[in-house]
Every structure is written in C-alpha cells, then in structure tokens.
Amino acid sequence: KMQEAAEYNMKMHPMWQGPLAVPGGDRQSPIDIVVRKSVFDSKLKPLETEYDPQTCQQIWNNGYSFLVEYDDTTDKSTLKGGPLQDKFRLCQFHFHWGESNAWGSEHTVDRRLFPAELHLVHWNSDKYSLFEEAVMEDNGLAVIGVFLKVGKRHEGLQKLVDALPAIRHKDSIVEFTRFDPGCLLPANTDDYWTYHGSLTTPPLTESVTWIVMKQHIEVSHDQLAVFRSLLFTSAEEEVQKSMVNNFRVQQPLRGRTVRSSFT
Ligand code: SG5
Ligand code: ZN
C-alpha cells in the first residue's frame, strides 16, 4: 500500500513528468540503512551547524512539500564538520510524510519506517557560487535528514505548523522570518550515518552527501495532521488532493558503504 501510494504520486506529479537527469544512476537516494552493515569511522567529526535565524525568508508550498527558504547569498547559516571537508550554506528545509503514522520517511533504519523525515538542504559555498551550480556537481550538496516520531508536541515546530494554513494550496508563498532551523535538530547530533547519494526529487542528481541523524525528534499527531491538511493542488483545480505520501521509493545500495560516527 505504502509503495503503491508513493509510486502513484510520483507518476501523477508534474515534477516527475519531465526527463530525469539520472535515470537508474548508481548512487540514488533514499536507501534502507542496515545498522549491522554500517561501518564505524573514527575520523567522522561532530557536526558544526551555525544557523542565523535572520536569514529565514519565506515558506512556500511547491506542490510536493512545503519549503522554508533561507537567504543563501552569504555564509550566515552554515554546516561544517561531520563527514564534510568544505563549508556548506543552508538554502532550505522541507519534510516528507505519509498519510498515516505508519510510514512517510524516505530513509529507513533496518526497514523501520518513520511517519516523517526532515531534510535540511545545504550547498558547498567553498567550491561553488550558486545552489544551481552545486546541484550538478559531485560534493555539491549536503543534506541532513532527521526522523520524526509521534509523541509529545514539538514547541519549535509549532511556529511552522501555525504558518501552514496560509500556504494550503500549491504555489502559495508567505513571508516567514526569524525561524531557527537548529531547533529542529535532535539533542545529540554527534551520532549519525553518512553515505553518498542523490536528491530524492528531480533532478535526482548524485551530488548529495547524506547525513542521517540517529536520534529522532518527537512531534504530536496533531502537528502531523496539519502537514496532511496541505494540498498538492492549486486553488484553481477542481479536484483537490491532500499532500501526503510525498516520499520517493527506496533505491538500491549498489555497493555503497554507509558509515557511522558512533559504535
Ligand atoms: C532540490 O531538491 C530541489 C528542491 C527539492 C530538493 O533542492 O531544488 C531544485 O531543483 C531547484 C533548482 O526543489 C525545490 O526547491 C523547488 C524549486 O525540494 C523539494 O522539492 C521539496 C521536497 C529535494 O531534496 S531532497 O533530496 O533533500 N529531498
Ligand atoms: Zn527531501
């Protein structure tokens, strides 16, 4: 049911209807992280995030997810360390989620599904000058993935949840400022898995260093229900479609190694 729902959404979604940059590449995402096959690497450092809430600009429904966008014209909100050699700039974050709490994440851990997954998207500002340039290049992007689990209400997330009714339809955008993306990270960011992969939406380019947090964050069922009240469709469309199951189906590992920063 879950795979069918995701495949159906992709086939029908305009984003997936053009030619795809990397059909059947050999480092595609997302993947299942098999804990016992991941390899501890003592050289992996703690992550260093330095986010300036002042760079937060707007929130928009792009018809696939909602994106909180940051001003990335300077190095004010950055990610370094971890598996990374260079400095990366935050440009946006977004989520993927399911129609029920039983599934919705893109990555899985030993086949365990989470109801949602947060992606903080950064591009290499040491090597490139624009996101659009970095997106095509090896080592161009670094995405932090954080699993969401249903439990108690997440105070930091609530400001975001409150903004969602204003962007219910596809293509709606509203101003959204002073949001610290760091509040969505788990307490422990030292423990993570990392591997070389791709974007999980078109253009699917194989430019991403994935950093998937071991620790999840908790959000309430009601908060996720507001995610599910968003729409894939614009205000003009006759048949409205709920924005749910906006995750890509899992991709083969094809000989890649998933490294862990912890034992
Ligand atoms: C790229 O990949 C896309 C995002 C997309 C993420 O960052 O950006 C572009 O292709 C712009 C050139 O799409 C947009 O920003 C819309 C213009 O994010 C989404 O579509 C939201 C799901 C997907 O990145 S991911 O691999 O972390 N899931
Ligand atoms: Zn994503």
Image (cartoon, rainbow, N blue to C red):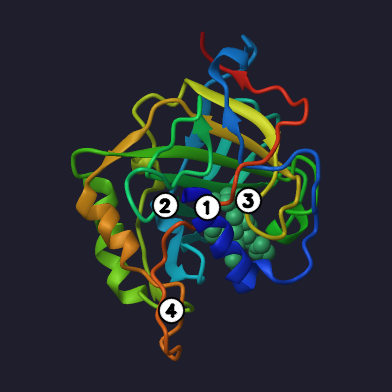
Q: Which residue is mark 1?
A: 247
| Label 2 secondary element | strand
| Label 4 secondary element | loop
Residue 3: mark: none
Among numbered discs 3 and 1, the one appearing first in the sequence = 3
Among numbered discs 3 and 4, the one appearing first in the sequence = 4
Q: Separation of disc 1 and disc 2 at Cα?
A: 7 Å
Q: Separation of disc 4 and disc 1 at Cα?
A: 21 Å
Q: Position of residue 68 (x, y in %)?
A: 45, 60
**Front-lying residue, 107 or 82:** 107
Label 2 CB-ligand 1 distance < 8 A: no
Q: Which residue is mark 4?
A: 172
| Label 3 secondary element | loop
Q: Which residue is mark 3?
A: 200
Q: In the rendered view, would you say 69 is above or below 171?
A: above
Q: Separation of disc 3 and disc 1 at Cα?
A: 8 Å
Q: Separation of disc 3 and disc 4 at Cα?
A: 22 Å
Q: Position of residue 98 (x, y in %)?
A: 40, 52
Q: Position of residue 222 (x, y in %)?
A: 20, 54
The answer to whether residue 3 is left or right of residue 61 is right
Q: Quadrant of residue 252?
A: top right
Q: Which residue is mark 2?
A: 97
Q: Separation of disc 2 and disc 4 at Cα?
A: 19 Å
- Asked if the residue at tag 1 contacts the one at tag 3, i.e. Cβ–Cβ closer than 8 Å, the answer is yes
